[in-house]
Image (spheres, rainbow, N blue to C red):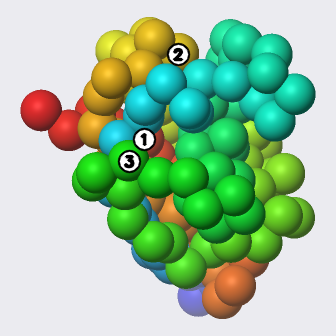
Amino acid sequence: MRLFLKALALSLLALPAHADSLIGSYVAYIGGDDLYNSKGARLSEPWQVLRQDRANYHRFGISQAGDEWDPFFSSIDNRAAMERMIMNGTIEPRAARILVNGGATVFVRIYGVGNTGRSVRVTVVD
């Protein structure tokens, strides 16, 4: 019985406190407007391009055909957290390369708990 309780306690420690679930997703076309920040500087990292795409969509009203609304990145604070969320999630190397060059459609899934995003998964839509 003691061995069973010890094994049970160890297995409970291995479980995450909260399992992340899908809290939002969207499709976006990464166009030329998404490759430059608000001051006109060329962006060089995929999370910068994704963040600018969402700022363009939600804040500046700039979108391309194929851009979708999302329930999460309308918040400036959530857009600011995008880099961390991508580092906690995944972005395919091919998607990262294409993002910084533009001209691609991406599918973005946002994972977290409640209204708190913790990671993002980005794939290129073929």
| Image disc number at residue 102 | none
Residue 35 lies, in percent from the top left, at: 60, 23
Viewer-nearest residue: 47 or 112? 47
- Give the alpha-carbon distance from disc 3 to disc 1, as whole Å: 18 Å
Identify residue for label 3. 64
Q: Which residue is pictured at 79% across the width and 21% down the height?
A: 40
Residue at image position (68%, 44%) is: 51
Q: Position of residue 17 (x, y in %)?
A: 72, 77
Circle 3 SS class: loop
- Tell us which disc is closer to us: 2 or 3: 3
Residue for badge 1: 122
Work out whether mark 3 precedes mark 1 in sequence or the reverse, and give the earlier one: 3
Whichever of labels 2 and 3 marks the residue nearer the N terminus, that label is 3
> Where 28 falls versus 106 (above or below)?
below
Please tell me the numbered disc located at residue 100. 2
Q: Is residue 69 above or below residue 60?
A: below
In this orientation, does residue 87 appear?
A: no
Q: Which amino acid is tagged 2?
A: Val
For image coordinates 77% across by 43% down, the residue present is: 84
- Point out the image quarter for the N terminus: bottom right
